């Protein structure tokens, strides 16, 4: 049995766990009953996958459940260095349009799964 690691690069916020991230998300968005059921069955990270507002969420340690990042994934930009600063700027603009004055970070860490 091996442990896999993958880089995480986001504009967003890092939380202790998915519940804390969900509470933050619910300050800005109302969840429907369907959303609630989906989260209960599949988890908040799965719910965040492919949100229409380009937000994404990822659990940082899939073994312990510790750590969760909610934000805009800019990791794909590392493959296009000439557009990277534009991708970061666009992600910051998007974050501000969604969360207004809520602080964000450029999060560069590792996911263990």
Image: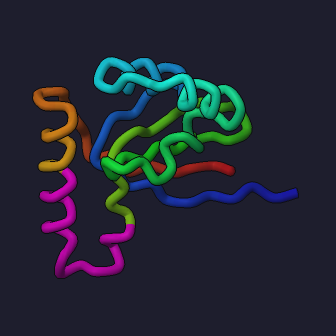
Q: Residue furthest right?
A: 1
Residue at the image point whose x is 28% and y is 47% from the top: 11
Question: How did the renderer colour the structure?
Answer: rainbow
Quarter of the picture holding the N terminus = bottom right
**Relative to 46, does residue 5 appear above or below in the rendering?**
below
Which quadrant of the view contains residue 21? Answer: top left
Across and down, in percent, residue 33 comes to 55, 23
Residue at the image point whose x is 18% and y is 27% from the top: 102
Helix, strand or loop for the magenta stretch, by majority: helix
Residue at the image point whose x is 21% and y is 71% from the top: 84
**Relative to 35, does residue 23 appear above or below in the rendering?**
above
Magenta region includes residue 32 = no
Across and down, in percent, residue 78 comes to 33, 72
Task: Tell which of 76 and 4 is nearer to you.
Answer: 76
Task: Tell which of 91 and 33 is nearer to you.
Answer: 33
Task: Tell which of 55 and 35 is nearer to you.
Answer: 35
The number of callouts visible is 0
Across and down, in percent, residue 31 comes to 45, 25
Magenta region includes residue 84 = yes
- Tell me the magenta residue range: 76-91
Q: Specify whether 92 is left or right of 30.
A: left
Residue at the image point whose x is 57% and y is 30% from the top: 34
Q: Specify whether 55 is left or right of 17.
A: left
């Amino acid at each position: 049995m091996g442990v896999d690691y993958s880089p995480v690069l986001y504009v967003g916020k890092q939380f202790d766990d998915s519940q804390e991230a969900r509470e933050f998300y619910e300050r800005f968005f109302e969840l429907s009953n369907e959303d609630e059921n989906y989260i209960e069955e599949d988890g908040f990270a799965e719910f965040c996958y492919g949100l229409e507002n380009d937000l994404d969420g990822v659990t940082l340690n899939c073994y312990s459940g510790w750590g969760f990042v909610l934000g805009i994934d800019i990791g794909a930009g590392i493959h296009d260095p000439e557009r990277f600063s534009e991708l970061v700027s666009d992600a910051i603009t998007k974050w501000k349009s969604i969360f207004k004055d809520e602080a964000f970070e450029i999060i560069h860490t590792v996911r263990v799964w």
